C-alpha cells in the first residue's frame, strides 16, 4: 500500500503546483496540508486521511467543480490536465480507503 500512498502524494504535489500557478491558494493549501499529514503518517492513517480528502469532492462548490483560470481565462489545456489529475487522485484515494489496488482485483478474478 506504500506504493499507492506515494502515487497519491505525487498527484497532490502536482495538483498543488497547478493550483498555485492559477492563484488558488486556498485549494493549494488544503491539498498541501493533507499531503503533509499523509507523508507524516507513514501510511498508518492513510485510509482516514484519504476519506477526508474524498470529502473535498462532495457538494456544490467542491473540488469537483473547480475550474482553473490563468490570466483571467479558463484554459482548456490546464483544465484538461487538472481533470485528469483529479480523476487519478479520486481513484487513488478510493484505493487507499479500500486497502486494495486494481491489480489486486485482477489477481482475484
Image: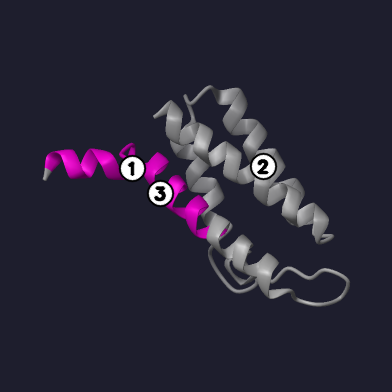
Q: Which residue is mark 3?
A: 94
- 22 left or right of 102 in image: right
**Alpha carbons under labels 1 and 2: distance apart:** 22 Å
Instruction: Label 1, secondary structure: give it.
Output: helix
User: Secondary structure of the magenta portion, mostly?
Assistant: helix
**Alpha carbons under labels 3 and 1: distance apart:** 6 Å
Q: What is the x, y in percent for residue 42?
A: 53, 22
Q: Which residue is mark 2?
A: 13
Q: What is the x, y in percent for residue 20?
A: 80, 53
Q: Quadrant of the C terminus?
A: top left
The image shows residue 21, relative to residue 49, as above or below, that is below
Q: Which residue is mark 1?
A: 98
The image shows residue 83, relative to residue 21, as above or below, that is below
- 28 left or right of 106 in image: right
Instruction: Label 3, secondary structure: give it.
Output: helix
- The number of numbered discs placed on residues in the rendered structure image is 3
**Which residue is at a point 62% across and 44% down the rendered structure image?**
12
For the residue carrying disc 3, how many other residues have a C-alpha within 10 Å: few (<14), some (14-19), or many (20+)?
some
- Residues tagged 2 and 3 counted as in contact (Cβ below 8 A): no
Query: Would you say residue 80 is visible in this rendering?
Result: yes
**Which residue is at a point 45% across and 46% down the rendered structure image?**
92
| Mark nearer the N terminus (1 vs 2) | 2
- Residues tagged 3 and 1 counted as in contact (Cβ below 8 A): yes
- 28 left or right of 45 in image: right
**Alpha carbons under labels 2 and 3: distance apart:** 18 Å
Instruction: Label 2, secondary structure: give it.
Output: helix
Q: Nearer the viewer, mark 1 or mark 2?
A: 2
Q: Which residues are magenta?
A: 86-108
For the residue carrying disc 1, how many other residues have a C-alpha within 10 Å: few (<14), some (14-19), or many (20+)?
few
Amino acid at each position: 500500500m506504500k506504493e499507492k500512498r506515494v502515487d497519491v502524494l505525487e498527484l497532490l504535489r502536482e495538483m498543488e503546483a497547478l493550483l498555485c500557478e492559477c492563484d488558488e491558494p486556498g485549494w493549494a493549501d488544503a491539498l498541501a496540508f493533507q499531503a503533509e499529514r499523509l507523508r507524516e503518517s507513514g501510511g498508518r492513517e492513510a485510509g482516514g486521511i484519504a476519506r477526508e480528502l474524498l470529502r473535498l469532492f462532495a457538494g456544490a462548490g467542491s473540488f469537483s467543480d473547480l475550474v482553473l483560470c490563468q490570466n483571467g481565462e479558463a484554459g482548456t489545456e490546464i483544465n484538461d490536465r487538472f481533470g485528469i489529475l483529479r480523476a487519478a487522485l479520486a481513484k487513488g484515494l478510493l484505493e487507499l480507503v479500500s486497502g486494495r489496488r486494481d491489480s489486486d482485483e485482477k489477481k482475484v478474478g
